[in-house]
Amino acid sequence: MEKQFKVFVYGEGEPRIFLNPPCKSIYSMEGNFMHAIERNDHFRTKDPEKAHVFFLPFTVVTGLRYGYERVSQDSSPQRNTVTDYVNVIAARYPYWNRSLGADHFTLACHDMCRGTSLSLSDPLKNSIRVLCNANTAEGFKPAKDVSFPEINLKTGSTNSFVGGPSASKRSVLAFFAGGVQGPIIPDLLKHWENKDEGIQVQKYLQEGISYHEMMRKSKFCLCPSGSEVASARVVEAIYSGCVPVLISEHYVPPFSDVLNWKSFSVQVSVKDIPNLKEILKSISPAQYMRMERRVKQIRRHFEVHSPPKQFDVFHMILHSVWLKRFNFKIFNDQNVLSQ
């Protein structure tokens, strides 16, 4: 990939809608990826004939300011904007029609992305969708789409969050703190909130207690899905050196094509929430040490750098798109797509 892979970024569209995403907040990865690929001379090509894939640079977060009616929750204007954008590039370039959009990709972390791409008589149905909320129950297709991590960049940098003490200095078995969102967190709170010293589960931390310090004190960090399947807690746990415990349904974890999540995380079904302590206690000290060591090894793949560094999250996203792109061939002379 490093030697060959090339991405063409379309320049069409009103900049304030298509080219100005946020780089801080829970949706920061939309902006960070877009700004990184715009400034990248290694992977980006300005010659579409040299491109392996084509990036559609619209951002769901910015688009919501202009294409979503909050009172009625009508997202049809935004969906129409996406359709119009596809129609414009299909009319101006031969590449969309050549592959029916299969060598094109979009990237989104906002949960509204499914309203944009899943409910259309969908011009993006063949495209590679790079999504935080990789929910197979809502149309995410692991053979075609890419799961990437939700990262909450409050300052635009991850430097202050990365790192933690050794396993021997982690005194808490498992930790969770957070508000009530979605169907899974209420179940977790019902069974474990303030009920066990080892499984420290709370809605709100007491004043003076640091959320990130609690992660650094914990062996396992509970990462239940909230309003959507993805949770920023997964990456926060990895940054802290805490083994993530994924509690979700229908979720495809980030970069699953190349990362063996079972080697550095625990995956718990919702029905097993009452058995959390028993499940975690059944993990031997030697097994836990291996998992904790692997968390540190894979952490670099979730780190955000500006400019990007080899093996970081930007490179992992491109690597995943590269893998999906070479799942099929395009025959220019016949205008056919071969899976």
Image (tube, grey):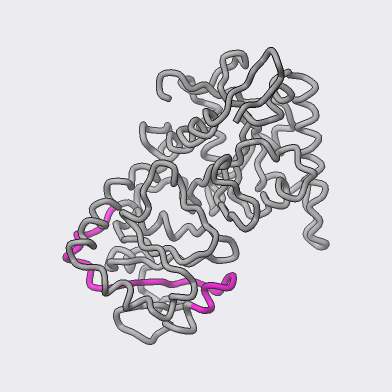
Locate residue 95: give its quadrant. top right
Q: Residue at x 67, y 49 (%)?
A: 113
Measured as percent of width and height from the top left, residue 39 is found at: 52, 26
Q: Is residue 246 above or below residue 322?
A: below
Q: Residue at x 56, y 27 (%)?
A: 38
Q: How many marks?
A: 0
Query: Magenta span covers which residues?
Result: 163-187
Foreground residue, 284 or 3? 284
Q: Is residue 252 above or below residue 268?
A: above
Measured as percent of width and height from the top left, residue 295 is found at: 30, 52
Q: Is residue 180 left or right of residue 218?
A: right
Q: Quadrant of the N terminus?
A: top left
Q: Residue at x 57, y 19 (%)?
A: 51
Q: Quadrant of the C terminus?
A: top right
Foreground residue, 333 or 302? 333
Q: Residue at x 40, y 77 (%)?
A: 201
Q: Is residue 94 left or right of residue 223?
A: right
